[in-house]
Image (cartoon, rainbow, N blue to C red):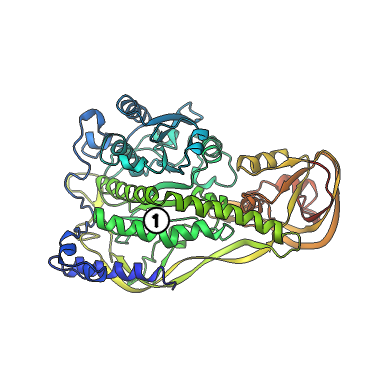
Amino acid sequence: MPRSRLPVHAIALVALISVILEPAGRSAFATATGQGRSGAAQQRKIYWADEVPKGWNGKWAPKFQVVPERTDFTRATSTLQLHEFIDVLKWNAEDMHVFTVFTSALRKVAPAIVLAHPRVTSPEEARASGKPVIYLQGNIHPAEPEGTEALLMVMRDILLGKYKHLLDHQILIFCPIFNVDGTDTFVTEDGTPHITGVRTNAGGFDLNRDGVKLETIEVNGLYQNVLNRWDPVLLFDAHLMGRVNHGYANTYATSTVPTAHPGPRGYVWDTLFPAVREAVRRDFGLETFTHCLFDEAHWPPTVWSHDNAIWSVEAKFIVSDYGLRNRMSIITETPGHPTFERRIYAQYAYILALLEFTNAHASEMQRVCNDADADTVAKVRAQAESGQLRNWVEGKYESWGKIDLLAYKTNDTAYLPGTSVRVTAPGSATGPPEVVHGVEHLTKPVGTKDASVPRGYLIPADMRDLVAKLRAHNIKVQVLDKPMAAVGEEFVVDRMVKARAGGFEMTRLEGGFFGPTTRQVAAGTFFLDMAQPMANAAFYYLEPQAADGFVGWGMLDDALRSLGVDKHPVVYPIFKFRKAVDAPGR
């Protein structure tokens, strides 16, 4: 296990043992971190299960309270109530600007709120400030509303409370309710909140599976009006899990697509996550860890895995896809069974600890992302023509090593007496969890299949829709004004296969690359120069064997069928070239 990770797990274990076995006096945590008795005295109580510290959200006049605060944590915020809350903030704070991310199919507006000091009202002003942009999002799945409420509270605390310093070195963009249509499609739920929205948008689409294909109004709006224009250095997305057996108040993950540049991902994993985890424990009394699950059919667990939590090495999730841009990204997932107040507190704690970190390390984070951009372009220019440059089209998770895990043996439900509402059964998933030793931490993304990265791609002129998708992803594509010839590789498709994967019917191409070969193309052909920061994303989307690139999502099915793939082998229509033999002005 790398040295940068081992101390985090070691400190976590002694902290947990100190809380569980030695609640008073000088703790093992204090010893491990070099604190004396005064430091131990300041060590927070750890809050388990439904526990929250008294008065954690402060005292606010009714007009500044979010919906859960006004309803004893029995209701979640609707889109109308969101607009009302934003209006109150606008009339009482000057460091904010509101713009529209998109207007939904049901004609509902999804607002984004820019917090900056001094006020910033455009991406151009943001860039001129020199401060990085951090984007934070809630309610992509409206049945998971605690992130929304936490984001609203954090906005309030920054604009009107004690966290104004979080605008010293960064610009924050909040989109508290992303899936506006799903938020206002109300259903009743067990526990709290009593009424929530539904997971999908008005068309029945899961917006957090649209990171590659960009087929929804909502995700297109996000990419065009936020990610492409404002270029956040970090994207944060808040979620909720179901009833789980782990003992953490919140869990986190980052993009694990092996194709993505390792610099931003490594920074999040090695530097940001350990620091924020420690800050959440120290400042808010909560334990957090990686977004995983263990096999609940066996006790004690032996594996703690991203795969078990449906977090994969594919790019379909927005947080995963964003890593292909040489940027940082985080998803958090609170467990679903604690009370609504506890879940909001868990998200609130993580968001504030995260923003403290990003504010303190803003320049460093910018530098990591800028270095990844420069490195991506430099490698294409130096190695692609010779065929030396390669990248991953498939991957899997391996273990970082063995860890100590917080877990409950049981987490059962029972009906609340006199009601038809299910709650956590008495004696189940309450109090301090057990510490399970020697559990494999299966969250290390590794590539399993690679392909050569070209100097560029040549895309037929009739694939305008495909090119529009590339441009929507902020990938630069030009049009040839003269014919050209290029030397490269052709992929021969022997067979196109359909198969279910991750709940979707995906396309897989069987075949292989042949070359070198020379191809002549006409004026009007689309030309994608890979010497750009988005090269890793372009490679992932266009490679014929990428698991969930454009091929995987069926975006080339019609083109391949028109070539006769159902009857005989065909040549993949997108040509990846190493060298332009005759490159006219473009």
Give left or right: position of 231 versus 578.
left
Q: Residue at x 43, y 49 (%)?
A: 362
- Examine the rendering and report whether any part of residue 507 can be seen: no
Corner quadrant of residue 191? top left
Name the quadrant of the C terminus.
top right
* Local SS, label 1: strand
Residue 563 coordinates in the image, percent (x, y): 80, 48
Q: Residue furthest bottom?
A: 438
Q: Of 352 and 19, which appears nearest the observer?
A: 352
Corner quadrant of residue 56? top left
Residue 32 coordinates in the image, percent (x, y): 26, 71
Residue 311 coordinates in the image, percent (x, y): 47, 57
Give left or right: position of 341 versus 136.
left
Q: Residue at x 45, y 50 (%)?
A: 363
Residue 323 coordinates in the image, percent (x, y): 53, 52
The residue to which callout 1 is attached is: 252
Give left or right: position of 552 versus 565.
left
Residue type at numbered disc 1 = Tyr
Q: Residue at x 73, y 41 (%)?
A: 478
